[in-house]
Each structure stands twice: as structure tokens, then as C-alpha cells.
Amino acid sequence: MQAAASQVDGVLVVDNTPHDELTPEIQSALENLPSTTVPPGSAPRGILLIQNRMNLGLSKAYNLALALAVKGNYQFALLLDQDSSLLPGAVNELISRFQAIALSLPIGAISGRNIEANRVGGIAFRLSTTIPAIFRERAYAANRLIRAEGVEELRTFTNSGTLVPLALLPKVGVFDERLFLDAVDYEFSLRLRSKGYHIFEARQARLRHRQGRMYTLRLGGREVALRGHTPNRGYTIVKDTIRFARRWWARFPRDVTGIVVSTTIIIVGGILLLPERDARCRATIAGLHDSGNRGDA
């Protein structure tokens, strides 16, 4: 959070923890940086804390912050997860690349390049880097995506490290609150593209992203580091991904199929390889069941 505050005009922190106590990360940030309140119509400086005291979900959290950013007359909002840290110069690079592309193309968002801090080991690491690279190259060839100086066009972006121009929100809408936690970025990406906007990644705008939890397992007599989610997280991954897929498969079948396949590999791999298999199975089954229940969205 300190790294972000040094590069932007204001930081809006949405705390979804279901109690009054702040997380250690937020507490540390508030102790080391000035906090503020937002008078009507003014732009916050320093850090503004939005403490919900209940988990409203990622989409709702983003939308609360975006509404305040719009009131504060900001031009852009930079989305950041709690497990991400901007590297120096990232925001300036995102803005300069965005402005350059906007001279010739309708651009809906531009993302920084996520450097994964939780790296898996052995063959799992090679597969996790090689397979996405192969699919990425095929996507460029098949979809005639744009590559220019310092940027690459994306089919979908990752939430954390993405710069969104606030002027577009009245045209494309905000984040879909029917998705609680997962597929939020995929849904917004495809919505932007359905409206004719391009999305890009700026290669030199970098941030460290620490996804999931690390597990150390013994496979074939060797210790292997694998990255995965907690068992209960499988519930939202399955439910939200299915809801997202139902909405967008007819319009973007290739993109949605790829996302569903990769998500299936993550879920099945977690059940087969990671601890607490029974809990992972129960969460997956519950997510499959509740994906058709629109009343709990």
C-alpha cells in the first residue's frame, strides 16, 4: 500500500473483513501514511479507509471505491489486490502508454505485468510458465492482437494492477456484483471488448502479486512447491466461473472455453494434489449446485 501511495494522488482502501479489527497490513499502512475523509465533491489524499465490517465481495468493494473516485473527479482508478505491490514507476508507465494508445484506438483498460511472488517448483513451474506462453502466442496469431512498443493487447486482464479510465463507466457499467469474488476481471474484460474497446498490458509497468497459498508436497520422492487456494475458495471459483461462462460463452466462445478449461484444471488439480481433499470436494459440489441459484448472488 505504501508503494501505491507514493505513485498516486489518493488511495481508497476497502476493508471487507467481518469485524472491527483492521488487518495487520491495513493497520501498518494507516500508521505510516496520512489517512483522510472525503468531503462531498472533493478528491481524497493520502489513504481513505472504507470499513464494511462484513464481506461484501470483490465486485461490491471495487464499486464502492469507484463511486468515490468518480465523486473526487479522478481521471483513472488503479485496481490493486491486497496481495500486490507496485514496483517503482509503474503508474507513470501505465498512464503514458494508455495516453499514447488512446490517440489511435478506443482503449478500455491497461494492465501492469504481474510478477508472481509465490513461485511453484520443478515441472509444475515449467508447465505454469510454458503452457500460458504457448496459448498466448496462438492467441496473437489467431486474433490478430496488437503488439507495439512497450505494450501487448490482451483478451482479458487480471484485476490487480489494471488502470481503468473512469469516464468509461457510464458507457460500460461497473463491476458485476452477481460475481462475488472470481471471474470479476474476465467479465469486465469481455464487457469492454463487447463495446468495442481494446485492453492492453504495459510490459514495463510491473507489480509483485502473491496469489494463493504455498504448499510443500512430496511427489516421486522429492519435495515440490505448489501454489493453490484454500479449500473453501473452490466454492466461489466454481460458482462465479460458471455464472460468468453462461453470460459470455455465446459471444466469446473461445475465450470462455479457455477460462473454463484452465479453471477446471486448477480445481481438479487441487482436489488431487493438495491437502484437505474432502473439504475441496464439498466446496466444489456446493459451487456447482449454487451456480444455478440466482437468489444468493
Image (tube, rainbow, N blue to C red):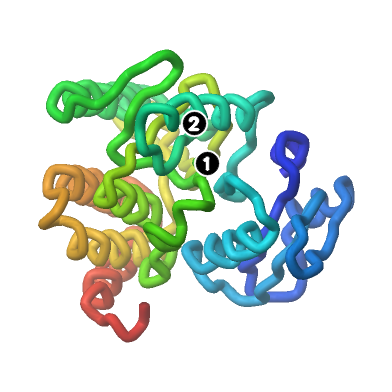
Amino acid carrying label 2: it is Phe
Q: Position of residue 232 (x, y in %)?
A: 42, 65
The outermost residue toward the top is 149
Assess disc 2: are there few (<14), some (14-19) or many (≥20) residues with their C-alpha within 10 Å of its C-alpha.
Answer: many
Would residue 261 be found to the left or right of residue 13 on screen?
A: left
Q: Residue 108: x and y, percent?
A: 40, 43
Q: Secondary structure at mark 2?
A: helix
Mark sitting earlier along the chain (2/1)? 2
What residue is at 18 percent from the left and 64 percent from the top?
A: 246
Q: Is residue 130 left or right of residue 205?
A: left
Amino acid of disc 1: Leu
**Residue 196, percent from left and from top:** 27, 45
For the question of whether residue 221 can be seen, the reply is no
Which mark, by number, is residue 163?
1
Q: Picture coordinates of residue 139 (x, y %)?
A: 19, 28
Farthest-out residue, front? 103
Q: Which residue corresponds to the image point at 64% horizontal and 75% vertical from the top-left?
A: 18
Q: Which of the numbered marks, if any, corresponds to residue 98? A: 2
Q: Secondary structure at mark 1?
A: strand
Q: Quadrant of residue 42?
A: bottom right
Q: Quadrant of the C terminus?
A: bottom left
Query: Closer to us: mark 2 or mark 1?
Result: 2
Q: CA distance from mark 2 to mark 1?
A: 9 Å
Give the quarter of the figure containing the N terminus: top right
Dot 1 crowding, Cα within 10 Å, few <14, some 14–19, many 20+: many
